[in-house]
Structures are given as structure tokens and as C-alpha cells.
Amino acid sequence: MNSQNGPGSSRTPSAGSGEVALPAPGGFDSHTHMDIMGLPVDGVLAAARAVGIGRVVNVGCDLPSSRWSVARADEYPEVHAAVAIHPNETSALDARRAEVLDEIAALAELPQVVAIGETGLDYYRDWAAPAVQRDWFRAHIEIARRTGKALMIHDREAHADVLSILEEYAPWPPYSVIFHCFSGDAAMAERCACAGYVMSFAGNVTFKNADALREAALVAPPELMLAETDAPYLTPVPHRGKPNSPAMTAYTIRFLAELKNLDVTDFCAHLQSTGARVFAW
């Protein structure tokens, strides 16, 4: 979850121009927050299906949203859940750490849960001390390793510490670490690619001032990429400034395919293959 929306404009490649709906095999939204959107889930999913987005991963940031994600994944076959405590929420819950993590661990065992996230480090906001965040991050890593579920990372202005902590637990099984809303530069993307970490790109890759992020996307191997919305945040061009939704993953997928000079059908096939490996669906 990264709230960075606001007015903006497009630049090469031309996000949102031409057809929006994806060709078969279509795509999926690897990270969304339908609970925050506050819209009927049926309608959100129908709009996504209409443009070729056939699955969504709804991501927890605290216990209520993790429970909500699990419940919706139980209700809708195209919804999958991720469960965790967001780093910005860790300080408020630290006095109940063992109790809260026990519930996250129990939820993580459920078959509809495909990832432990979003967890990680956020040094942009000062809502939780870095040392507290690091302790919770390691605890989430242990849950992910114990359950065999993917680790979905929130990394905001904390690249060095995130990479260092991941290295403590190396080697990682292939396709088991996802950098949600990848925010690094090309050098960071190189390091992630060498380690086999998956990089999920959100709508901010289409923003006018996102040259460094586009350079990272160019470096990222197609087989180590995912696309996401982080809805209702980070709405891609040409709808920047409006609330985001899973259907808009299609804009980001088309943008990334054009940026990387890949046929959109081939890029969708890469995404589907990577999603199956990461989330075991």
C-alpha cells in the first residue's frame, strides 16, 4: 500500500492509448485492496474480467483486512488472499505481537492464502521505529518460510535493510519473494534479478516523473515481473488522480509490454507463468 496518487501526465510509451482489454491469456492484479475501495466486490471483479484481468490478490495490512481478504477469497474463486501486518501498523500492535502473529500464522495455513504480505520496511513514514519494523519483518519471513507461501514485501526508502534481511534467510526458493510496488532503480532491479526476486510494478511506472522506475522495469527480466494496482492508490495514466481498481492493471500491463518492446500477448503469457509459480494457483 503506497498512497502517492495525484495529477500527472503520460510520457513515452503512451499509457492508455488504443485498446485497453488484454488478449488471451489475459492478466491479473497481483496486489490490490478491495476492502479499502469500499465498492461491491461483484462489480469490481466484473469490471476486471471485462478487460482480461481474471484474478486478484487482495492484500491484508492488519488483522481486519487480512480476515476480510481471506473471507473474500473463500467466497470468490478468482480472489486470492495475502495476510500480514503492514510495517506502518507494527508499533500500534507491538504490545500484542505474539497474539497477532499467531493469528496471521493461522490464517497463512489456509489454502486461499497465497502470500504473506504486505510486510517489510517503511522508512518514509515514522509511524513505527525501524527496529520494531525489522523485528516484525523477520517474524513474517519465518511464517512465509514455515508455510511455503510467497513473501510480499513493502519496501519504501528501505532498500538496503530489506535486502540485508532477506540475505539472512538465503537461499530463497525460486519465485518466493515479491517486491510489491517495486520502487527501486535499475541497480536495485539488477540485484533483485540476480537473487531471483520477483518485481511487481504498479501504475506509478506510467507517471511522468518515473524515469528511474521505467529504467528498472527495462532491466527486470520478463519472467521475474508482475503487474499490480495497489488499488485504490497509484492509478495509472490516463486515469491518474481517480481511484484505482483491479481493471486498471490492464493499462499497466500494456504500458510495460510497450516499454520493453514485447508483444502484449507474450508478456501476458510471462505474467501468467510467473503468477502460477509465485502463488501456486
Image: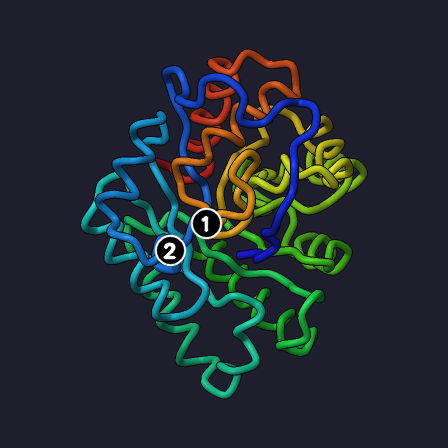
Pointer 2 with pointer 1, Cβ within 8 A: yes
- Residue type for callout 1: Pro
Depth order, front residue of 25/6: 6
Kindly identify which numbered label has been placed on residue 243.
1
Label 2 or label 1, whichever comes before in sequence order: 2
- x, y (%) of residue 279? 41, 40
Quarter of the image for residue 258 reads: top right
Which residue is under mark 2?
37
Instruction: Identify the residue at the far right of this view.
Output: 187
Q: Is residue 63 above or below residue 269?
A: below
Quarter of the image for residue 66 reads: bottom left
- x, y (%) of residue 93? 49, 81
Depth order, front residue of 33/83: 33
The answer to whether any part of residue 148 appears in the image is no
- For the residues labelled 2 and 1, the Cα–Cα distance comes to 8 Å
Instruction: Identify the residue at the far bottom of this view.
Output: 95
- x, y (%) of residue 6? 61, 51
Q: How crowded is mark 1: few (under 14 residues within 10 Å), some or many (20 or more)?
A: some
Kindly identify which numbered label has been placed on residue 189.
none
Q: Residue at x 57, y 80 (%)?
A: 91
Callout 2 secondary element: helix
- How many numbered dots are placed on residues in this image? 2
The quarter of the picture where the C terminus appears is top left
Q: How crowded is mark 2: few (under 14 residues within 10 Å), some or many (20 or more)?
A: some
